[in-house]
Image (cartoon, rainbow, N blue to C red):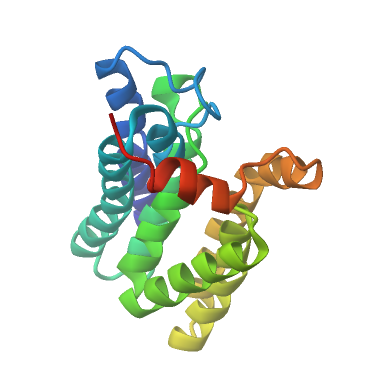
Amino acid sequence: MKVFLSLILGYAFGCLNPAAWVGKRNHVNLKEAGTGNLGATNTTMVLGRKAGAFVLIFDVAKSFIAARLARWMFPQLTVSGMLACIGVILGHCFPVTMHFSGGKGLAAFGGMMLAYNPLVFVIVVLSGIGIMVLLDIGVAAPLLGTVLFPVLAYVFSHDIPTTVCAVIASAIILYTHLDNVRKTRNHADLKVKNYFRDVLFKREK
């Protein structure tokens, strides 16, 4: 029962999508603009850095807060926080409030790592940035994260349930990024250097 409640708690948090809110406030449907993704990257591309930063922080925070709340509510269940974060990722990617069509869950995945262990979060983020800049492929970061997180979760905890939760979360992120992998193979995905130059470092009007 506690497993189910942890997942449901996280799912409710995950259904809170700041990209949809920011888009609606600016009279823009982010599902139809830019890359069509309800996440921080597309928000930045379409609406600017401030909007993108808000979405990024919110999506990371909702996983972090859900994990802490689940741990407080179900202290006897050692993986309650991890389960809540899986629920957040599922709610973000497949929200019932938006006909099960949401974002790709990468920021929520980051929030899960932050809630689990801040050092793991730093290692994965820095490694992801390094490899995607080195290869100039945006999807390289989430793909590396899906490999590193389960490995680091086991190294830091030596706990099988914790590692299994990390594997499940990573599998969801891998699934939601399959389209990016296909675009990269067809040379249609956004290049990292172009993103940094044209989006992050471009002056906002």
Residue 42 % position (x, y): 46, 34
Q: Quadrant of residue 133?
A: bottom right
Residue at the spot 28% in from the left edge and 26% down from the top edge: 22
Near-viewer residue (180 or 158): 180
Near-viewer residue (130 or 61): 130
With respect to residue 55, does 193 lie above or below? Answer: below
Left or right: residue 145 compared with residue 57: right
Residue 182 % position (x, y): 76, 42
Residue that lies at the very extreme toward the top in this rendered image: 27
Left or right: residue 180 compared with residue 55: right
Decide if residue 121 is in sight here.
yes
Left or right: residue 140 compared with residue 187: left
Residue at the spot 63% in from the left edge and 46% down from the top edge: 177
Q: Quadrant of residue 69?
A: bottom left
Residue at the spot 59% in from the left edge and 62% down from the top edge: 132
Residue 9 % position (x, y): 31, 45
Quadrant of the snapshot with the C terminus: top left
Residue at the spot 44% in from the left edge and 34% down from the top edge: 45
With respect to residue 38, does 10 lie above or below? Answer: below
Left or right: residue 68 compared with residue 82: left
